Amino acid sequence: MAKHTIQIPSNFIMGAAASAWQTEGWSGKKEGQDSFLDQWYKNDRYVWHNGYGPAGATDFYNRYAEDIALMKQIGLTHYRTSINWSRFLTDYENVVVDETYADYMSRVIDELIASGVEPMICLEHYEVPAYLLDKYEGWSSKHVVELFVKYAEKVFERYGDRVKHWFTFNEPIVVQTRVYLDALRYPYEQNTPKWMQWNYNKTLATAKCVQLFKAKNYNQNGAKIGVILNPEVTYARSSAPHDQYAAHVYDLFYNRVFLDPLIKGEYPQELFDLMSKHDITFESTTEELTVIKEHTVDYVGINLYYPHRVKAQSKAWNENIPFHPSYYYEHFDLPGKRMNKSRGWEIYPKIIYDMGMRIKNEYNNIEWFVAENGMGIENEVVFKNEEHIIQDDYRIDFITEHLYYTLQAVEDGSNCTGYMLWAFTDNVSPMNAFKNRYGLVEINLENDRSRHLKKSGYWYQAAIKERSFVADLDEEYK
């Protein structure tokens, strides 16, 4: 191992992220303002670790000034969060704004700017209103697409004078994959055509929001609109054609289903062919596909945590069950891989470099940034020192390696403009709740959710201030 000083470009984003529902809590929430996550928690609380969920979260709603002061202390250049769609309105059909919640968001944005932290705002981070899920099956409905665009317009009108970074969705594929493809989450319905329709309607909603954003000149003063995606960097087990094809199909269904239309304006024809073959083609019109083609995003955030490894499907398919993309692949467990055993995820920092090269070579080198990257660890309290500061050297090592590969991608010509850590503070995750901690800042649940910087918080502070960090790199990284 050898120590290397890695320089961080002066204009490179060094931020952190969290969502509304994972931080706010229910303080001030009105009857009828449940999101999908709130509804799930109310109906299925026992599946959430130790019963924690969005009800309490980190109480950011009441403690945002305290948290933003910590962001300023660390020196974050940017903070990405979401507006809770379910709370921003009191009437989703007529798009009536909840003035109390809207004022709260305005104060959060002003506090961030006053603290030198650039706000990045996402319009939906799993917060689809439960009302729309119950009445229209959520993103199954084109009507919900139109209601989302009307909601977006209200948000742009309120905050467009101050916010320069806008995103329609965070990880638009996730909710329907967990609910309708794999039936792992409430309301537990395996329905592959519905999964694909949700995928399409979120793409259409993004294109329509881009269209509105440009038509109403919300892009003045350098403001941009994009989307936060979570494509899984996919590796085949081997170079054999059958394994390569398995990875190719996985990539089509889970990655290119959003990357291609949102960045290039068109779906891959091969995806249409596979959808047709398995009778899961989404409902679309020529006019809608034209909107998608003509209104691509300005930039894209990419959430990257772990690689995905697949091999050709070796089992006979049960023809009595609905089609699932795993008809073509199965997961491959790489022998000897590095693991975050708390989360059950492989650690392979080169995913960021490989994604950067893919964006450069296949997606017109569009502007992009790492929108989430982080490490969730159980029972971090055992790592506290005598000063009661969590000594999370494992997280510092994780960030160091992934940030190194991010900057290598920049050096090799990828148009990557920043790195955002998940998360700023420990926060609630679906089902895992506070089981795995991700934050630079500890949330002490046993002490009124008090906040304390971890060692990684001080490390990140120094890296931002010095615009450099020291990495112990072996031959693997050269």
Image (spheres, grey):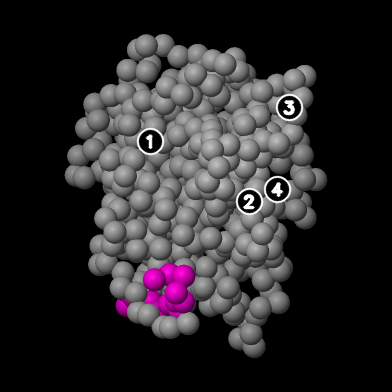
Dot 2: element: loop
Residue 403 visible in the shown view: yes
Image quadrant for the C terminus?
bottom left
Q: Are marks 4 and 2 in contact (CB under 8 Å)?
A: yes
Q: How many marks?
A: 4
Asked which secondary structure carries label 1, the reply is helix
Q: In the image, which residues are magenta?
A: 465-478
Instruction: Give the crowd class for mark 3: few <14, some 14-19, many >=20 residues within 10 Å.
Output: few
Foreground residue among 23 and 179:
179
Task: Say whether disc 4 or disc 1 marks the residue closer to the N-terminus.
Answer: 1
Check disc 3 and report its element: helix, strand or loop: loop
Front residue of this view, candidates 224 and 53: 224
Q: Which mark is residue 317?
A: 3
Of mark 4 and mark 3, the one earlier in the sequence is 3
- Judged by depth in the image, the label closer to the viewer, 1 or 3, is 3
Q: Assess whether residue 320 is covered by the magenta stretch.
A: no
> Of callouts 1 and 3, which one flags the residue occurring earlier in the amino acid sequence?
1
What distance separates the C-alpha of mark 4 from that of mark 3? Answer: 30 Å
Residue pictured at 75% horizontal, 53% vertical: 49
Tag 1 residue: 155
Residue type of the residue flagged with mark 2: Ser
Task: Kindly check if marks 1 and 3 are in contact, taking CB atoms under 8 A apart as contact.
Answer: no
User: What residue is disc 4 on?
Assistant: 431
- The three-letter code of the residue at mark 3 reads Trp
